[in-house]
Amino acid sequence: MSKQVYTASLDRKSTVFHHHCTDQLQIFGIIIDAVCRVGDIGKGGYNSLSRVQQMETLNTWKDLIDSSTGFASPYSASSSDDILWRTTLGNVFLGEGKRSSAYNVGHERGESSIRRIRDDDRPIWEHWWAGWNGRIELEDTPPGIEVPEVRNIGSSVTRASTGRRLFVTRRGYIGLCPSSGKVGDVVAVLLGGSTPFILSAMSKGERRLGEGDSEIQGQNAFVLIGDCYVHGSMDGEALRGEGTDDALGVDNIFLEWSFHSLFSFICQRNEAVALDWWSPTFKAGGWNL
């Protein structure tokens, strides 16, 4: 069984219907907001050159977060620095303690040591950030922090950010989405999924019209782009109405049928299948952390 660290739709289940005439999947979910700003695509930091490129991108993400947080945002009680360090990690940490490997002793059983980050991880991230920006020597750690911990944090950032974009929504939600995410896409929680998803609205010309299915045309028709991390919306907050004036209502959402959209959603509901959600490319297994 995989270790599920996100519960965006709580324990709510959804039935998926396939409309043959229009070749669409009907799923129940909640549309949280629309994307209004996106950052550059994150790059890996595996050598000196890519390290510089990685930090150039992450620093532009920092600027985007700094300019997007304020009194009117959903994160008025959080600092931009707190949003930054948690979002660059996807709020999860690979590896434990002093281990330089990203896996614990359960690695022999195929169990990755993935956990939610804690407040006491922040000094480790801050040391990595300063070191990766060239302000200090990465190996010159202060008391209480070990070099393998710093390396694990760096690996966690790389895996969470590589091949993804930082995005900001109209109401100020901040997160990470696939590289193909763009302004105008919507962020949604699909019932039964462990993470939110990025959806791209289909134009009328893209929709397949089928006899007897006209009632499902015209609204909430999307192409599934992929899963995403939304800071403050990974534990059912959208379903509970947190951060909004009113609880968001569950609605019908129609997805263009494809093997990708059906398989990716099913895999999120299948606890027997595990894959790191931050993978920059789609792989079988989906988003069931």
Image (cartoon, helix red, strand yellow):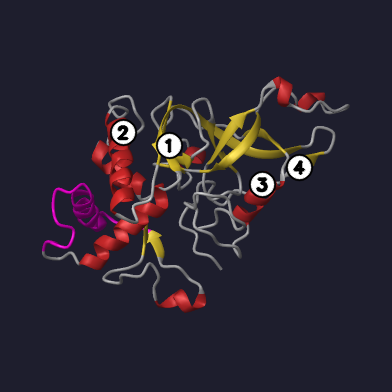
Q: CA distance from mark 4 to mark 2?
A: 38 Å
Point out the residue furthest to the front here: 49
At x 32%, y 34%, the residue is 75
Q: How far separated are the C-alphas under marks 4 and 3?
A: 15 Å
Q: What residue does disc 1 label?
A: 242
Q: Position of residue 66 (x, y in %)?
A: 27, 31
Does residue 195 appear left or right of residue 81 in this picture?
Answer: right
Residue 154 is situated, as x and y percent measured from the top left of the image, at 30, 56
Q: Which residue is mark 3?
A: 260
Looking at the image, which residue is at 39% across and 73% down? 104
Label drawn at residue 145? none
The residue under label 2 is 65
For marks 2 and 1, give the CA distance: 21 Å
Which structural element holds mark 2? helix
Type of residue at label 4?
A: Phe
Q: Residue at x 50, y 32 (%)?
A: 247
Specify start and end residues of the magenta stretch as a single range. Answer: 116-142
Q: Quote the CA–CA distance across marks 4 and 1.
A: 29 Å
**Label of residue 17 in the image:** 4
Of the numbered discs 4 and 3, the one sitting upstream in the chain is 4
In front: mark 2 or mark 3? 3
Would you say 49 lies left or right of 256 here?
left
Q: Inspect the image, locate mark 2, and give the three-letter code of the amino acid beneath it.
A: Ile
Point 26% across, 67% down: residue: 148
Query: Disc 1 marks which amino acid?
Result: Glu
The residue mark sitting in front, 4 or 2, is 2
